[in-house]
Amino acid sequence: MVIVIAGPTGTGKTDLSLFLAQKLNGEIINADSTQIYKDLNIATGKVKDTKNIPHHLLSIMDITEDYSSSLFQKDSRKCIEDILKKGKVPILVGGTGLYLKSALYDYQFSKKENNNYEGYSNDELYKKLLEVDPNTKIHLNNRVRIISALNYYEANKRPYSAKEKNDKLLYDTLFIGLTADRDILYYKINKRVEDMFAQGLLEEAKNLYDSGIRTKAVMTPIGYKELFAYFDGTITLEEAKELIKKHSRHYAKRQYTWFNNQMNLKWFKVNYQDFSQTENEVLEYIKSKI
């Protein structure tokens, strides 16, 4: 049995994973693309106290190195197999949907083409797309996505609308999703940002800024690039803080959309006043399925 804990930022996935690992003899596999890297701690919400629970794929890469979903697929599957062989429960936790999808499903990464279709009108491109992908939901005037879909078809000989739709699971898996009412979640996200600053986010970001490193690892997580603009003098600290909150809220919304479309999660509404109630509710659900 493999357990997945997913959902948007700010819902308590880390705390729940630690609780379940203690109760179910589990080991945790990080499925957050930003927590893969060393030195990215506060902005990424990296666990501070692992409670002696083994954690895998956490802080394994240098910020100057590249890491990808295909690498995670290979690494996470090895972790899952190793944990299962020990008679323990693998618990994947994180908000990077593609990491979870690639690890647990028979997910094939696509090849790429790079034809810019220069000289074609939007109508001509859309007609070409309909010929190879009649089920497309891409809008006629979304030229960039139409070209991307055509290139995908040319490289993989299958329609873009079928991408990421393979629902063949490789493991016996329980999918847990944590959710909250939007107003409550947004309040918690905003407070979480304030807490990050209290924990030293500004200093962490300044150290990265002074390093001069601007790799994808550094520029992807919410929290650093916004503060880099403050260090550059283009915005105020308060403006940077508000941008971090705004981007975090938008990211949570995108996460909801992705998980609802791509995974069949059993959603649990978080009780922020008494999180132990949420923990026990999830535990009882898992026990009923084992």
Image: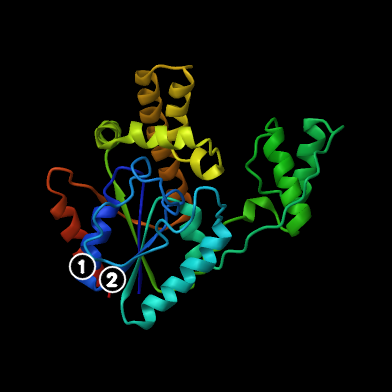
Q: Secondary structure at mark 2?
A: strand
Hey, what amino acid is under mark 2?
Gly
Give whichever of 84, 273 is nearer the camera. 84
Circle 2 residues within 10 Å: few <14, some 14–19, many ≥20: many
Residue depicted at 49% across the width and 65% down the height: 103
Tell me residue 259's x, y (percent). Answer: 43, 50
Q: What residue is shown with label 2?
A: 26
Tell me residue 219's x, y (percent). Answer: 51, 38
Tell me residue 196's x, y (percent). Answer: 29, 36
Hey, what amino acid is under mark 1?
Gln
Circle 1 residues within 10 Å: few <14, some 14–19, many ≥20: some
Do callouts 1 and 2 mark residues in contact (Cβ within 8 Å)? Answer: yes
Asked if residue 176 is positioned above or below residue 39 in the image, the reply reads below
Judged from this view, the residue extending furthest toward the front is 211
Tell me residue 152's x, y (percent). Answer: 72, 51
- Which numbered marker is on residue 45? none
Q: Is residue 67 visible?
A: yes
Report the side of 195 relative to 70 (left or right). Answer: left
Q: Which quarter of the rendered picture does the C terminus lie within?
A: bottom left
Q: Which quarter of the rendered picture does the N terminus lie within?
A: bottom left
Q: What residue is shown with label 1?
A: 22
Q: Secondary structure at mark 1?
A: helix
Residues under labels 1 and 2: Cα distance? 7 Å
Residue depicted at 20% across the width and 67% down the height: 22
Q: Is residue 184 visible?
A: no
The picture quadrant where one finds residue 214 is: top right
Report the side of 24 relative to 241 (left or right). Answer: left
Residue depicted at 53% across the width and 64% down the height: 73
Judged from this view, the residue extending furthest toward the right is 119
Q: How is the image coloured?
A: rainbow
